[in-house]
Amino acid sequence: MLDLFDDYTLRTVALGSAALGITSGALGTFAVLRRQSLLGDAISHAALPGVALAFLLTGSKAPLVLVAGAALAGFAGTLLVMGVTRTTRIKYDSALGIVLSVFFGFGLVLLTFIQRRPDASQAGLDRFLFGQAAGLLQRDLVTMAVLGGIALAAMLLVWKELKLLAFDPDYGASLGFPMRALDVLLTSLLVVAIVIGLQTVGVVLMAAMVIAPAAAARQWTDRLGLAVALAAAFGALAGVSGSVLSSEAERLPTGPTIVLCATAIVIVSLLAAGRRGLLWRELRGRRDRRRLRVAAVLADLLALEQQHPDAHRGHSAAVLSVMSGGALPSLQVLERRGYVRRLGEDEWVLTDTGRTEAER
Amino acid sequence: MTSGQIEIQLIAVVVAVACALPGTFLVLRRLALVSDAISHSILLGIVLGFFVVGNVNSPLLLVGAALVGLATVVLVQLLQRTGLVREDAAIGLVFPALFSIGVILIARYADGVHLDIDAVLLGELAFAPFDRLELLGWDWGPNALVVMSVILGLNVAAIALFWKELKLSTFDPALAIALGFAPAAVQYALMSLVSLTAVGAFDAVGSILVVALMIAPPAAAYLLTDNLVRLLLLAAGIGAGSALAGYWLAFALDASIAGAMATMTGVAFGLAWLFAPGRGLLAAARRRARQKLEFAQTMLTIHLANHEGKPEAAEESRIDHLDRHLRWAPDFAQRIVRLAERRGLVRASGQVLELTQAGRELAADALAR
């Protein structure tokens, strides 16, 4: 852990991954809430030809140039998705699939074309495929932090408008807010968040960084502000732990490791989060079932008592089990609460408090 | 062309057709992104299968990988059924996780073996002819060609056999349930086909091209026809055409074959989007332009009919007056008058217009509607 502060490379990598996690986590929350989770997948795949074209046209590998190319291509991809769904009967899912695979394919053509040019010093471009945190440099870090900061600041600036967009765009439109423009703005911010992460996590897995932190955060809260903050925190946690793990262990690729860390956060959240968690849900279900069984046994005892005039005759657990099934544990619970009394080895009767409780 | 080139193109065409058939149903059922999920997560299946079988070319590997593909669909549905995440997010959570596990397993334990991530993602069709199936002393052709031909046959057979079930559950799932057709079973059968096809194609052309070949050709065909049989045939044809065009594009640029084929499926879709008769952007634009002209002519007859026989008629029916009254630019007014004259709606003598009987009827008809 001390390495984190001493080791220059590791610190760069961890800071970079944190920046990417925070930005994609926060903006991903909106995408997930608006059922556009997989738009992130399409954007990140669509960014690949942008990276290649930016390099082909400028011959530069400066992070800002490549990121700008990626952003333009990712943005063009989302515009195409919107255009196809608006003007044809092709549905959203097919439009996303076409854009992501065709742009990616075109990106591959360009990348292989670049690689086979004799003069090219193309090394480093293919790290956009799977990401490589170890290759992060100080200048990459600055680019990532500045762009991420701008995106987050823009998000905060139009916070209430984005909130409207996420939950009730029709109401927003009726209030006179330019919802179409806000939609484009939010999508552009998402594009920025995604291209920031491309060199670390890679085109193929970047979608997970948009979806996983947001899906995890959603489990813990119903408030948008808290969800965005939590998603940012989860994103940072996944980014830092994944990149540190992968630089500590040998042959542990960065992108997949970060994604698995994010997935682990999701699994924990799904199981354990507040009231929604599956674990709590299961426990609550069991408790409710037990409570129902106990109440049923109590009611059965009352019914038996009313049918048998000699009030102080006991009834065996076997008889009660026939009536409601598995009565013995419930009887023991009731005995502990003082609602029933044991007469003999296997003879149970209601106490006075038990009778009032049962009649209630 | 060398025999190697012919074989590569044969493989490409067979893969394209095999993908287009189940892909058509994915597009119609709004499950297009399932192909994305399956084509990524079968990487894990191939890796796990490789650990068990120890041989990349075993047919058992295909079955194992197809099972993992199917498991992806089941996992997505389970996750969705908890009610904690929606379908799109569930897809986006499951496949990156499975894919990541696959990549990490390869990096740690299978480095240097034939399993290499680039080949898996991007495919290396160029090397496919070297990997041949020799059985009983015979050379049966490239492995990929044999495997994909078998899968293509399976797809055709399954679609023909379950034709009415597929058709019904795709277009009217509620009726399918009511008639007792078990749409869930049809769904899983379709997913098994998709998974098997993806695994087979994956080896030859890589996972991203699988998505392109499964979605783009059927989507393009969907803009061209309303008939399911024609849709399947067109999708297969467009897929095959894009595959061949992609091969030659890659040949010309000396670039990735799979990437070029994906690009060409996109070009095919773009062409259909622009030029599809009736539904394309161009057809829609022309329809709008025609409607605008027709509407303007109707407006002209209504305007003239309104003032016909009234004292102001002489003033109102002048062509140079339309500019003020209907807010038409002089050029546009001239054009509309000419069109209306040709249709026999108005007669012009100098600047003054006069309705014909046909024009009067059109105006009355338009107002009555």
Image (tube, rainbow, N blue to C red):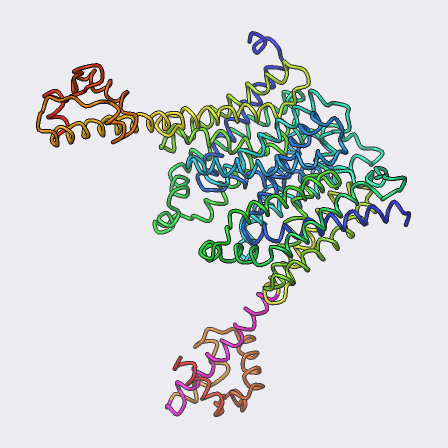
Report x, y in % for residue A225: 38, 31
Report x, y in % for residue B197: 68, 44
B112 drawn magenta: no
When the figure is inspected, residue A91 is found, relative to residue A161, above or below; the finding is below
Report x, y in % for residue B33: 57, 44
Camera-nearest residue between B231 and A336 = A336
Which residue corresponds to the image point at 51% horizontal and 47% vertical from the top-left? B184
Quarter of the figure with the C terminus of chain B: bottom left
Which residue corresponds to the image point at 13% horizontal and 26% vertical from the top-left? A357
Q: With A143 as the anchor, is A107 left or right in this view? A: right
Report x, y in % for residue B3: 90, 47
Residue B73 image-quadrant placement = top right
When the figure is inspected, residue B358 is found, relative to residue B139, above or below; the finding is below
Camera-nearest residue between B256 and B33 = B33
When the figure is inspected, residue B210 is found, relative to residue A292, above or below; the finding is below
Q: In this picture, which residue range is highlighted in magenta?
A: B283-311
Which residue corresponds to the image point at 54% horizontal and 47% vertical from the top-left? B185
Which residue corresponds to the image point at 12% horizontal and 29% vertical from the top-left? A308
Residue A324 image-quadrant placement = top left
Kindly report the secondary structure that dominates the magenta region of the rendered protein.
helix
B294 drawn magenta: yes
